[in-house]
Amino acid sequence: MKDNELELIAHLSELRRRLMIVLGVFLLFFAIALAYVESIYQWLVSDLDVKLALLGPGDVFWIYFQISAVFSLAFTIPIAAYQAWKFVLPALKENERKATFMLIPSLFLLFILGISFGYFLVFPIVLSFMEGLASDGFQQFYTSEKYFSFLISLTVPFGLLFELPVVILFLTAIGLLNPRTLRKSRKLAYFCITVTSVLITPPDLVSDILVLVPLIFIYEVSISLSAYVYRKRLEQSKLDQDMSLQK
């Protein structure tokens, strides 16, 4: 077997091992969240004026499963980022290793920030709008399964979108992305952000702006951070070349 084939097999084995670690950590945090899920559920529904209904005995399990999965995802993200960092570590220079390692805690914080933005700002606006539409001609009746599926679909995407700056920083630091590409893709990115904002919010201008402006701001911050890291990377590369020539 050729050396490059052996190297590929070794990389695939390493990737498989790290994916198994991430899966194991997710299941561990899932089990922990499941042990406290009833308290989490009571906290999430404490502000509701009505009690949520169940249509079947299996609904309770599915609701608890979704809540536990989201909490497990939040705590697994930095572990997954660390495993990804360890996987690409041999290809990174010393300064790149330190810079990318410092990004890992930010993933957890930004995910929580995004979830909070969706839960405390976007979700109440959307729910209020939906209730306003149904107030005249419909009797409002919420099931727990539908309510939490709706809640999670509005909050988790924000948690992931808020991590965009860190992902872009990491890709820039390892040389897979540069600010020039991001600037060229600005029109397409704005279009995707606008479509996303319209799809996940009620059809009114205020709601669209409340979501659109933060997402555009995140993208522009990502470009600025990418430019800074890219510039530092070029400076370090030039310095390394100068030192190599001096030797």
Image: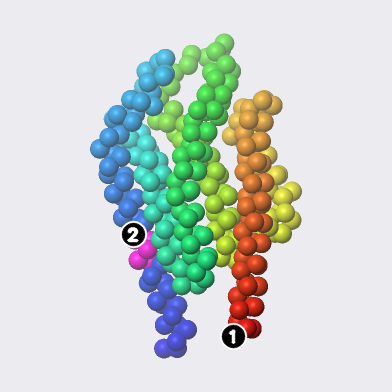
Q: Which residue is mark 1?
A: 247
As displayed, is residue 208 above or below residue 51?
A: below
> Is 17 included in the stretch rendered in magenta?
yes
**Residue 42 image point, x, y percent:** 33, 25
Q: Earlier in the sequence, mark 1 or mark 2?
A: 2
Q: Does dot 1 land on a helix, a strand or a loop?
A: loop
Part of the protein shown in magenta? 16-21
Looking at the rendering, in which quadrant would you find the N terminus? Answer: bottom left
* Residue 116, x across and y down, in percent: 48, 33
Q: Are marks 1 and 2 in contact (CB under 8 Å)?
A: no
Residue 185: image location, x then y, percent: 71, 54
- Please state if 223 lies on the left or on the right of 120 as rendered: right
Observer able to see residue 156: no
From the image, state whether disc 1 or disc 2 is nearer to you.
1
Q: Which residue is mark 2?
A: 21
The one nearer the camera, 194 or 142, is: 194
Q: Is residue 175 visible?
A: yes
User: Residue at horizontal 46%, vertical 53%?
Assistant: 104
Q: Is residue 198 magenta?
A: no
**Labelled disc at residue 99:** none
Q: Residue at x 40, y 61 (%)?
A: 83
Circle 2: is it few (<14), some (14-19), or many (20+) Cα within 10 Å?
A: some
* Residue under the image location 55 percent in, 13 percent down: 135
Per the picture, the main secondary structure of the magenta-coloured stretch is helix
